[in-house]
Amino acid sequence: MARAAARPNSVVLASLLAGWALGRGCLPADLGLGRDPFDALLQEHFPDLVWRLPEAAAGPDAADRSRALELDDLVALLQRYADRQVVGASELAIVVAHGCLGSGHLWQDLGLGSREELSALMRRNFPALASRNARDMKWKKYLYRQLCEEEGLFICRSPSCDECAEFDNCFGAED
């Protein structure tokens, strides 16, 4: 366990696994990584853990295939900002992108216990991207907004967030 304690993502990875085991969130059993990368990540963080993936975890489901381009764009965005010095940051880019495909708040879709847990994950693994969310926009909305801005698309109707009728949808409390 000393090895796991030395890895900054071990706690959040344990939380992701616990969330999946408890049926929370929308992540597949392999957290969206695929069997071999998932096994390698577990070995890196929890070398003594025996975790058996169900056979159904062998590939993407139909919903993932229908949103493959969206998923690829999210993974690319997150991996561009991943801190290469943090073990597991690149893999967590894939996990977070898969969570974005859910219909709830991102922290809930990841199966995490709180928004703060997600915010800590983002600050640790994607610090430059996280620091740009200075107004604490909801993470899923923030990530999609970043994608739109990179493509030169502006879907917001108001010139600034402060003037927008949808302000609470982007910045309000997440229950």
Image (cartoon, rainbow, N blue to C red):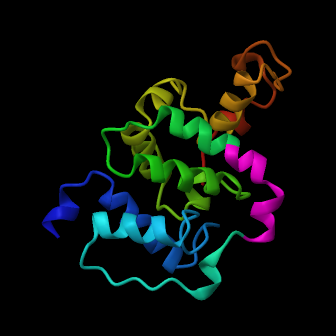
The residue at the point 66 percent across, 73 percent down is 59
**Side of 156 where 71 appears, left or right:** left
With respect to residue 169, does 131 lie above or below? above
The residue at the point 41 percent across, 46 percent down is 89
With respect to residue 144, does 47 lie above or below? below
> Looking at the picture, how far across and down is residue 98, in whole percent?
63, 56
**Side of 155 where 31 appears, left or right:** left
Q: Quadrant of the N terminus?
A: bottom left
> Looking at the picture, how far across and down is residue 49, in whole percent?
30, 80
**Side of 19 where 9 appears, left or right:** left
Q: Quadrant of the C terminus?
A: bottom right
As drawn, which residue projects farthest toward the top?
159
Residue 54, image quadrant: bottom right
Q: Nearer the viewer, residue 60 or 99?
A: 60
Membership of 67 in magenta stretch: yes
> Looking at the picture, how far across and down is residue 169, in whole percent?
73, 38
Count of numbered circles on the image: 0
Residue 162, image quadrant: top right
> Looking at the picture, how far across and down is residue 67, in whole percent?
79, 54
As drawn, which residue projects farthest toward the front?
36
Membership of 27 in magenta stretch: no
Residue numbers of the magenta segment: 61-72
As drawn, which residue projects farthest toward the left?
2
With respect to residue 114, does 145 lie above or below? above
Q: Nearer the viewer, residue 141 or 174?
A: 141
